[in-house]
Structures are given as C-alpha cells and as structure tokens.
Image (cartoon, grey):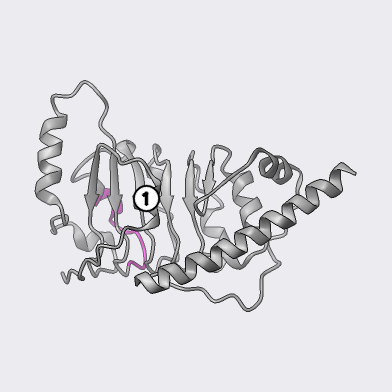
Amino acid sequence: MRRKPNTNIKSDPERFYSAPNIQIDFSNIDCAHPSQLQSEEANNEAAVRKQMDAAKNSAHRTVFGVKLNDCELIDLSGLSLLIQKYCQPNQLTILDLRCNQLCSISELPAFTSLKYLYLHGNELEIDCLQFIPLQLENLTVHGNPLSLIVDYRTHFINHFKELKHLDFCPITKNERKWAENAVVDLTVKRQNVVLQKMKTKGQIDEYREKMKQEQQKQKEELEKRMKKDQM
C-alpha cells in the first residue's frame, strides 16, 4: 500500500479538537476502502500499541480517535473491522475522513460515541447525513456538494441537537433559535461555487479565506433576519 509523503501541515481538525487518549493514524495511505488497510499498520503503530498497553492498567475509560484523511477513500466498507483491531466501536469519539472521495457514510451509525466527525472535502450529498443517529458535537461538511445548498447549515443545526460547532464555526444561541423556527429549503443551491479538495497548504489557506468570507456573509444575513423578526 503506497503511503504518501507527510507534509507536516497542522490541519484545522488537529488544532480544533482535544486529543483523545489514543489516536490511530492511517492518513495519507492510498486506498479505496478501509478494508484494504486491515493488514496494514498505522503510521504510528508502535506508539499506539504502547499506549494501549498502558491503558490496560488505567481505571479511566480509554477513548480513541482515528485519522483516515487524504486516503482517496470512495466508501467506508470494512471500517468497523479496522477499528476493532484497536478498540470497540463505542470507544471511538473522533473520526477524521476529510479530503477523500466519499459518496456514502452509511457505516457510521455503528460508532455510537462519535462526537467529532470531519467530512470536509468529499463528494457527499445532503441525503448522506439525513439518517445518521449520532449525538455529534463537532461536524465539518464544507467542500462537499451538499454545501452548495443555501440552508445546509440550518438543516444540520436542526438535525444534530447536540452540535456545538459546524465547519469550525460556533453555533450561537441566536442561530439555534433561528434554525428552530426556520423553514428549510434543501433545493435552493448557490451558484458559481468552486469546491476544492484541500491537498496543499496553499489550497488550504485559499479555501479557508473563502469560507471565512462566506461565514461572515451568512452571519450578517442571520443578524438581519433576527432584527427583522424583532420588529
């Protein structure tokens, strides 16, 4: 299995979440399905095994995070079996799947303790997350076809009641209040939006700036709506 060079660029997810007890890194390995990684070792296999041995003597519950970003994945077949090499499905709290080619994520409901889910830079449509019964606190979906939908943010705020951050942007009380009363139209899409897969630092910086501008615009629109409703 070909392993791509590590650019050592600290990504948004790595800055954003609190590290789990044990993080298993399969990032930057060319494969179409997690099942192809079953016989592979993680990039940090030795460190993971050492941490797992130490955790056996701990009175605290061990939680795990798994990195599968930048792997060219097209689906998640075999994900549960791969995870079970290291932990039980209900011990997984962080899953990083950004910058792949995923069109389906139907395997995710098995991971009932999942709190942080990074899906940006894939090929997901809005229906992919419609029936995912997870209590997510942090979710990223920008850079997917679904992010072309004008009301996608409102939709996910309503769908995931425990969500605290969406696309690295905090969900405010006013935004949640607005979302609860909003009529969401999932058919209206933005025009002339370029979806980018964030493979290099230059692309990451460029895309981040565009998202920042887009989020500011959404915030201004939201404030205008709230003021109008208060009149």
Main secondary structure found in the magenta portion:
loop
Badge 1 element? helix
Considering the image in quadrants, where does the N terminus appear? bottom left
Q: Would you say 70 lies left or right of 132 here?
A: left
Residue 144 in view, yes or no: no
Q: Position of residue 222 (x, y in %)?
A: 73, 52
Residue range highlighted in magenta: 73-82
Q: How many marks?
A: 1
Q: Would you name the residue on which mark 1 appears?
A: 15
Query: Residue 18, position in %: x, y?
Result: 35, 40
Image spot of residue 29 (x, y percent): 22, 66
At a point 30% along the width and 62% down the height, the residue shown is: 9
Q: Is residue 39 left or right of residue 20?
A: left
Query: Would you say residue 58 sits in the magenta stretch?
Result: no
Q: Position of residue 97 (x, y in %)?
A: 36, 58
149 vs 222, nearest the viewer = 222
- Identified at 64% across, 65% down, the residue is 149
Quarter occupied by residue 188: bottom right
